[in-house]
Image (cartoon, rainbow, N blue to C red):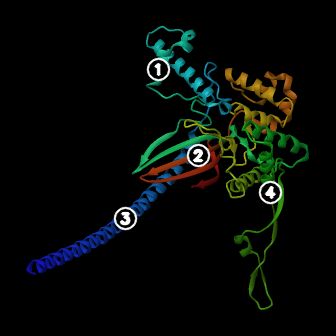
Amino acid sequence: MCSRFCRQDGDSARERRGVILLVTLVILVILSTLGYTLSAQVAARRHRDRFIVDYAQAQYACTSAMKYAMTSLADLQPSVVRDPNAPDFSDVFAMTEPQYQELLAQLAAERAIDARRLSGGGTTRNTRATDANDLNQYSATASVTIPGPYGPRWPLVTEPVEFEIGSAKVTIEIEDENAKYPLGWALIQEEKLKAEAGAGFVTFCEWMGYRPNEIQGLREDLAAVGKVRPFAVEFKALSVATTAPTSLRERVTRTSTAGSKTPVQRPMRTTVTVTEQMDQQNAAFARLFHSSLIDTEIFTRPSVVSSTRNESAMKYLGLWATRQVNINTAPRHVLEAALTLGSIADAPKIADAIIQRRRVKPFSDIEDAKKDIFRHAAAIEKCQAFLTTTSTAFTVRVTAVSGVARTVAVAGVTKDGRKVKRIAVISD
């Protein structure tokens, strides 16, 4: 009997220890959960606080860099420099990835042979394409890009400028806006240009790989934007009614029946110049083209899927209401779309002739183009108002990164000599 009671006491003791152990485990689980939750909340709060600080520093750096870029832009004198022996940038947008990599390999081999020849190797240009050792040696030490009309990759006017402001790393890029297809041309409603402008937009879209139903949808969306504000091509000075300035109204008064003096608003006429009207249109369409009225999803859809390239219609679209395309710096599909305003049938031939000539020597002016491509002089003259050989519209893109925060500001500007005029600034 004693042994039975001893066994019962032992079982009770083990049960108590088991309950205590279970309670201890539950408490530990609760404490660990509370600790994890508290640490996660502290980490999240610390991350939010860090992001706020990083974002403030990035925003300050972005604003400061934009002011610096706008000030420095007055000294920028972009000039087209073309090397007839370098690969042409005009058709890179339409290349498949294997074609593009083959072109890069050819350029890498040429640069490697140039480097060895300058160092005393004495290799001639004829062996460039087949010298794999030089290619491998060069590719291992430098990246290769297809140079644009100004030297850096298209559409950059200069090499990107990188520097630091506090903890933020800043990059400034300046792009040639006249080298892109002006989206406003798709809104032209003048009867004498409507058909050609529509054909030009279709040409651009077909080059970018859009299907007919997609092109029709884009035209309908843009037509809705045109109803908000028509895109004018021709301007004339306007005389509009206005009121006298406040300072003048205060001096012109009349006495009322009660003897008090009341300002009289004397009507006046003022002239709105062509330049002022164009600036107003540029600012208006800059807002419209960067608003929700434009569905940019289809424009940003990649036309070439690659980890090394960013090819989409958005890259080649001008969204600042520009009115001219630079025949020295525009790629093939932009040239063809622009030249349809002169001749829908001959636009591809004229574009090819322009590309072949500018590889040797850039055009000095449109008259130079008409003389050199005399067979199509009439077509070039017909669309002369939409062409230029010197870019005056640019995009300034400033990117600032501080920690985990990133801010971007994009400004559209026009430049006439040293005079820089801002169209609009879009912040992201």
Q: CB of mark 2 within 8 Å of CB of mark 4?
A: no
Q: Which residue is label 4 attached to? A: 224
Q: Which residue is most to the front?
A: 1
Image position, residue 348 (x, y; %): 80, 29
Q: Which mark is residue 136?
A: 1
At x 68% / y 37%, what residue is drawn?
Answer: 179
Q: Residues within 10 Å of mark 2 (few under 14, many from 20)?
A: many
Q: Which residue is label 3 attached to? A: 40
At x 36% / y 68%, what residue is drawn?
Answer: 37
Judge depth for marks 2 and 4 and give the one in front.
Answer: 4
Q: Which residue is most to the right?
A: 191
At x 24% / y 75%, what residue is drawn?
Answer: 19
Which amino acid does the dot numbered 2 rest on? Val
Judge depth for marks 1 and 3 and give the one in front.
Answer: 3
Secondary structure at numbered mark 3: helix
Which amino acid does the dot numbered 1 rest on? Asn
Q: Which mark is residue 396?
A: 2
Q: Which residue is most to the left?
A: 2
Specify the quadrant of the image occupied by residue 229.
bottom right
Q: CA distance from mark 1 to mark 3?
A: 49 Å
Q: Residues within 10 Å of mark 1 (few under 14, many from 20)?
A: some
Secondary structure at numbered mark 4: helix
Q: CA distance from mark 3 to mark 2?
A: 41 Å
Which amino acid does the dot numbered 3 rest on? Ala
Answer with mark 1 or mark 4, whichever residue precedes in sequence.
1
Q: CB of mark 1 within 8 Å of CB of mark 3?
A: no
| Residue 258 appears in view | yes
